[in-house]
């Protein structure tokens, strides 16, 4: 009797684990979800950086849009998402090393990097080198021209 009960318990546990693994595999977030989660985190960092500048909202928004464009380019080149079937891991190359920045499981992506780490990536020379000074100058000139009219 005890032997049969142990077999039943083991079978139930195996079935529960199998069902859980299937659910995890079916709800494993993809690359786009990881990119969006990281972009959302970086957006918070950038907004916090520019909130103290006494600039009009229109130029602040334009600056945020430009900064996110640079960040998109950086992430496209430096971020990879590895799929491990039941979970996924977002890695960003920073100073030559691949660092985990996000974990995806059950249709959710969680940032493993804190605010300070995201701030370091956003301010890294690798991102800053993407900034085209002519684009920034054109943005400022456009703002000045609109306000002089």
Image: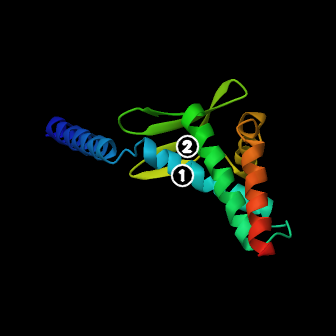
**Res. 112 in view:** no
List x then y, in percent, for residue 141.
78, 59
Whether residue 67 sits left or right of residue 78 in the image: it is right
Q: Which residue corresponds to the image point at 71% horizontal and 70% vertical from the top-left?
A: 58
* Percent position of residue 25, x then y: 31, 41
Name the spot of residue 9 as percent of width and height, x first: 23, 43
How would you rate the neighbour count of disc 2 (Cα within 10 Å): few for under 14, some for 14-19, many for 20 or more?
many
Q: In this figure, which residue is indicated by the disc labeled 2?
A: 102
Nearest to the observer: residue 72 or residue 88:
72
Disc nearer the start of the sequence (2/1): 1
Quadrant containing the N terminus in the rendered view: top left
Q: Quadrant of residue 16?
A: top left
Q: Secondary structure at mark 2?
A: strand
Q: Quadrant of residue 130?
A: top right
Position of 12 with respect to 59 (left or right) is left
Mark nearest the camera among 2 and 1 is 1
The percent coordinates of residue 30 (x first, y second) are 40, 43
Q: Residue at x 40, y 32 (%)?
A: 84
Which residue is tagged 1?
Answer: 37
Is disc 1 placed on a helix, strand or loop? helix
């Amino acid at each position: 009797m005890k032997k049969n009960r142990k077999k039943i318990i083991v079978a139930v546990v195996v079935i529960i684990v199998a069902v859980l693994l299937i659910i995890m595999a079916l709800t494993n977030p993809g690359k786009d979800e990881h990119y969006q989660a990281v972009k959302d985190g970086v957006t918070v960092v950038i907004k916090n950086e520019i909130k103290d500048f006494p600039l009009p909202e229109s130029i602040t928004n334009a600056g945020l849009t430009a900064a996110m464009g640079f960040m998109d380019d950086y992430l496209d080149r430096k971020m990879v998402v590895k799929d491990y079937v039941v979970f996924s891991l977002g890695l960003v190359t920073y100073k030559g090393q691949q660092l985990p920045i996000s974990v995806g499981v059950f249709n959710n992506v969680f940032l493993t990097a804190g605010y300070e780490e995201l701030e370091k990536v956003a301010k890294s020379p690798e991102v800053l080198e993407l900034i085209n000074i002519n684009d920034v100058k054109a943005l400022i000139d456009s703002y000045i021209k609109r306000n002089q009219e």
